Amino acid sequence: MARDVGSTYDFEIWSTTGRVVVTEERGLGPVVEIVRAGLTEVERACSRFRADSELSILTPGTSRLSPLLADLVATALESAEDSDGLVDPTVGGAMQELGYDRSIELLPADGAPIRIVRSVPGWRRVRLDGARLELPEGVVLDLGATAKARAADLLAHRAAESVGVGVLVELGGDIATGGPAPDGGWQVTVRDTEDDPACQVTLSAGSAVATSSTVRRTWQRGGVRLHHVIDPRTAAPAAPVWRSVTVAATTCVRANTATTAAVVLALDAPRWLSDRGYTARLVDQGHRVVRVGDWPAETAVA
Amino acid sequence: MTPLQRSRRLQTGLAGLGIVGALGASFGIGQAAHTGHGQVASTGTTTPGSHHRSGSTGLRSGSTGRTHEHQRARSTSTQPSSPPVSAPSPAAPQATTSGS
């Protein structure tokens, strides 16, 4: 289902929601066309829930990737490098083992207890040389941590450049912007769930913001609640010290890489984010807010 | 990643979006393709409806013969000097960031 109101277009995508906002109403139609077409391409390239996606039919050994999938794999490997392996695209096998093997709304309410026997192969075992991918036996790629953010970055910039208006693309909470911002900047609400503290911030033109959560996209096995942010060091869901982590950065990929790494790092997250100069907001299990870097003081949503 | 690397990386990714590239062309905007040596070259517009894909994506091009982990200088802090977020204006929010 999609909804078009003035300069805003809402839609459903990948078991979540998306939104397109433009600074000039005349640009909404063509911008939406570009975004929807691009998302279809991304899904065909890297969905792990589509048997016919390019990612799903990859086999061990050497493959020649499409330019788009090569870009998405390159992005994932860059994120792994930038995060010192805390965000790792080779968690695909672990994700399957944990039971997250289909679209989240199709997962059973509960199932047999999970016994983690596999380790994460590690991103350094994957070789990408241009569009030539070498995938070792037993390595299953999951680009879920970065592909959505990369899609938001690419499509916000492409649409803004093509149509000549300011564009905000939000995909499941990952927000990228391109072109000029509205007067006063893009106004963004930061809130993971209805139970969480909310605030509003101004996002500058061309900037991005992303949130990772341990309370959304969850499922149960053996009565134990699991979430989808995997710690590559243990092949298990990261310790849920934080309900959510939000980072603003120059690109959505950078923001998303930092939020995912922060969730994995648990108690070490604030220092890691601060040491790297990130602007971040973390919400702990007591719903307390921790601000890092230049994150502004909490201001209620207008 | 430096701003220039980020810019090139973005142009490379945009070139990989074939359908989107074609749509962009229909609005009279040229595309940028990534060359084998990390340079960005304008390829001009394409015929509306056609699919353009560059022959190489990513910074780790085949022509260099190098693999992923050796190609990019590490950076411990790549944030811009001005923060990407600041205190809000009185205007209503246009979007929400949340986990998914």
Image (cartoon, rainbow, N blue to C red):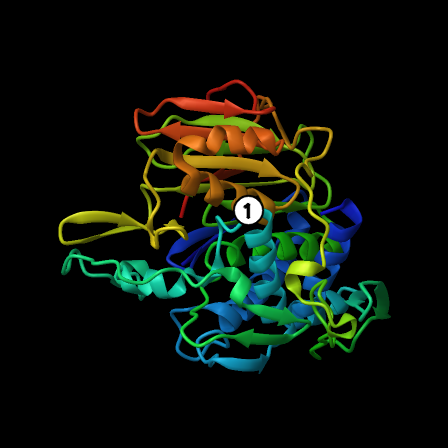
Give me the chain letter of mark 1.
A
Q: Relative to residue A22, is residue A57 depicted above or below?
A: below
Examine the image and state in which quarter residue B70 appears: bottom right
Q: What type is the residue that disc 1 sits on?
A: Ser
| Residue A261 falls left or right of residue A279 | left
**Nearer the observer, A160 or A46:** A46
Q: Residue at x 69, y 31 (%)?
A: A183
> Of A35 and B59, which appears nearest the observer?
B59
Quarter residue A69 falls in = bottom right
Question: Which residue is located at x 30 percent, y 61 percent?
Answer: A100
Q: Is residue A76 above or below residue A193?
A: below
Q: Is residue A123 left or right of residue B33?
A: left
- Residue at 55% in and 27% down: A201
Does dot 1 land on a helix, a strand or a loop?
loop
Return the x and y of residue A257 as percentages of the image width and height.
53, 47
- Residue A206, position in %: x, y? 69, 42
The answer to whether residue A7 is seen in the rendering is no
Reading the image, the residue beneath label 1 is: A83
- What count of labels does the image hold? 1
Let me know if residue B25 appears in the view: yes
Q: Residues within 10 Å of mark 1 (few under 14, many from 20)?
A: some
Q: Quadrant of residue A129?
A: bottom right
Q: Is residue A180 left or right of residue A151?
A: right
Where residue A253 appears, as percent x and y from the top left, is 58, 49
Name the spot of residue A213 as percent of width and height, x first.
Answer: 38, 41
